[in-house]
Image (spheres, rainbow, N blue to C red):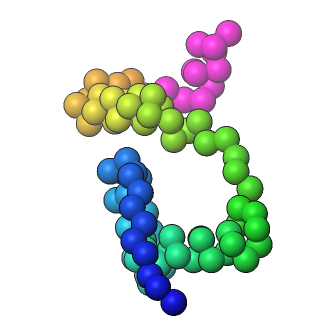
Amino acid sequence: MTSVNLQIKLDSELAASARELAKSMGFDVPTAVRMFIAQFVKERKLPFVPSEPDPFYSRENMDFLRKSLEQIEAGRCEKKTIEELDQMAK
């Protein structure tokens, strides 16, 4: 059987996350891609159900969380109890 090279372009953050996850599972990204393609061909469908991305991990929310963390680390925050927050929401 002849081998061929397959090139794909990925966002650098996605590629880094994929490398890290694959390594934690004991293999590399090319192996993960081969596993995906083998299952894709065998089942003749995607081996997962596509879903909407979790909005928690959106770029906007991650930026907001980073900014909030910077404010906390700089001491620019106020502590409130749940009860105080409930009162503020009314």
Nearer the observer, 90 or 22? 22
Please give left or right for residue 63 compared with residue 74 in the image. right
47, above or below 60, in the image = below
**Residue lying at 44% horizontally and 82% vertically, measured from the top left:** 3
How far from the left and from the top, in percent, is residue 4? 43, 75
How far from the left and from the top, in percent, is residue 81? 54, 29
Which residues are drawn in magenta? 80-90
88, above or below 49, in the image = above
Nearer the observer, 31 or 25? 31
Q: Is residue 57 visible?
A: yes
90, above or below 35, in the image = above
**Residue lying at 38% horizontally and 31% vertically, measured from the top left:** 63
Q: Please say whether residue 87 is one of the residues in the magenta stretch.
A: yes
**Residue lying at 58% horizontally and 21% vertically, measured from the top left:** 85
If the image is split into quadrants, where does the C terminus sit? Answer: top right
Most frequent secondary structure within the magenta stretch? helix
